[in-house]
């Protein structure tokens, strides 16, 4: 089964993840920790990026390794791999992948990621350390789940935040906000304050005002950059260290913010990660 999703940004994020996992294992291999890799939206282990005509020269058609394969290929290997997905077909493929890696300790789960992640974080003992990858398609991840990761003190997290979806759910003109999205946005952003944070009085009057028949409410959403800045600030309230995210775009349109966050409050734990992540994100 070919799992089709993504595009060039998919390769970018997996490149960053893979480089970070290699750095993490090299940095911690001499310590006595038990090291875990957890993938809460694991997919099938491979993916076929959705193509656009002008991308063919850049990415030939082939089945690429997904995050799970990338993690399994990292040397030195993690002591435990935890792969979770809701889709039963994906679970079947993950079992096949597990069978083809008898040398690795692989645990497979079929749970909503918002159930799996808190349970995984609660299972971390004193000598456990983990990297968690959160790669939802869209709005599946609850903010309350991130609080469990932040409170663990032992988990480094990479997360795709669905910026384009938030922009679509919050129209520029505040009058066009649809009440049916309220619950989803609050669950995704973890606060009801998003409406006050995102909408401000319009700076410029609508052009139609000249003719006295404007339909503009006078309340406008902040732009994508400001919105991303607000999300980064919220993550920094709960995690010990959150660098600026990487913007993943398609044809100049913002799609996702790719975040790294460290839950360990010890400065020595995140000082090294900070230098590594800075250079990992800059590499092409
Ligand atoms: C973007 S894909 C993950 C791709 C994967 N990280 C890779 O690199 O190959 C998202 C995955 O999340 C799964 N999924 C969707 N909703 C979910 C949920 N609520 N909990 C867990 N998995 C979910 C889908 O079945 C899909 O396999």
Image (cartoon, helix red, strand yellow):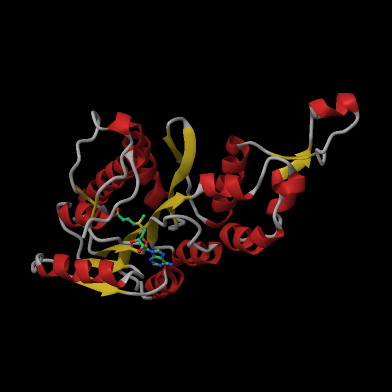
Q: Please name the residue shown 22% across and 71% down the image.
A: 92
Q: Please name the residue shown 42% across and 72% down the image.
A: 112
Along the line of sight, which residue is nearer the eye, 250 or 52? Answer: 52
Quadrant, the N terminus: bottom left
Residue 256 spot, x, y in % from top left: 46, 44
Image quadrant of ligand 1 equals bottom left
Residue 141 spot, x, y in % from top left: 48, 62
Considering only vertical position in the picture, is 33 above or below 215?
Answer: below
Q: Does residue 89 appear to the left or right of 150 in the view shown?
A: left
Considering only vertical position in the picture, is 284 above or below 51?
Answer: above
Considering only vertical position in the picture, is 214 above or below 90?
Answer: above
Residue 119 spot, x, y in % from top left: 41, 75
Quadrant, the C terminus: top left
Along the line of sight, which residue is nearer the eye, 149 or 127? Answer: 149
Q: Does residue 59 appear to the left or right of 199 in the view shown?
A: left
Considering only vertical position in the picture, is 144 above or below 206?
Answer: below
Total numbered circles: 0
Along the line of sight, which residue is nearer the eye, 224 or 269? Answer: 224
Q: Does residue 170 appear to the left or right of 60 in the view shown?
A: right
Q: Please name the residue shown 56% across and 59% down the image.
A: 188
Residue 96's image quarter? bottom left
Residue 283 visible in the shown view: no
Along the line of sight, which residue is nearer the eye, 42 or 252? Answer: 252
Residue 97 visible in the shown view: yes
Residue 130 spot, x, y in % from top left: 32, 62
């Amino acid at each position: 089964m070919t799992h089709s999703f993504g595009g060039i940004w998919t390769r970018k994020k997996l490149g960053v993840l893979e480089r970070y996992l290699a750095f993490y294992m090299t940095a911690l291999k001499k310590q006595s920790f038990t090291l875990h890799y957890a993938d809460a939206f694991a997919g099938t282990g491979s993916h076929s990026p959705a193509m656009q005509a002008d991308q063919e020269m850049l990415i030939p058609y082939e089945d690429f390794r997904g995050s799970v394969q990338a993690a399994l290929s990292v040397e030195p290997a993690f002591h435990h791999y935890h792969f979770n997905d809701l889709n039963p077909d994906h679970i079947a493929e993950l079992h096949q992948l597990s069978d083809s890696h008898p040398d690795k300790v692989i645990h497979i789960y079929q749970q909503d990621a918002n159930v799996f992640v808190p349970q995984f974080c609660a299972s971390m003992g004193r000598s456990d350390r983990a990297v968690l990858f959160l790669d939802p398609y869209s709005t599946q991840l609850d903010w309350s789940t991130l609080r469990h990761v932040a409170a663990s003190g032992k988990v480094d997290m990479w997360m795709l935040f669905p910026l384009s979806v938030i922009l679509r759910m919050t129209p520029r003109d505040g009058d066009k906000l649809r009440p049916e999205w309220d619950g989803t946005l609050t669950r995704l952003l973890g606060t009801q304050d998003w409406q006050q944070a995102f909408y401000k009085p319009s700076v410029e009057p609508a052009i139609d005002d000249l003719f006295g028949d404007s339909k503009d409410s006078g309340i406008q959403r902040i732009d994508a950059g400001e919105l991303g800045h607000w999300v980064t600030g919220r993550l920094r309230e709960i995690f010990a260290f959150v660098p600026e995210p990487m913007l993943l775009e398609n044809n100049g349109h913002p799609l996702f913010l790719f975040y790294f966050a460290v839950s360990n409050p010890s400065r020595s734990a995140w000082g090294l990660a900070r230098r590594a992540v800075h250079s990992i994100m800059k590499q092409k």
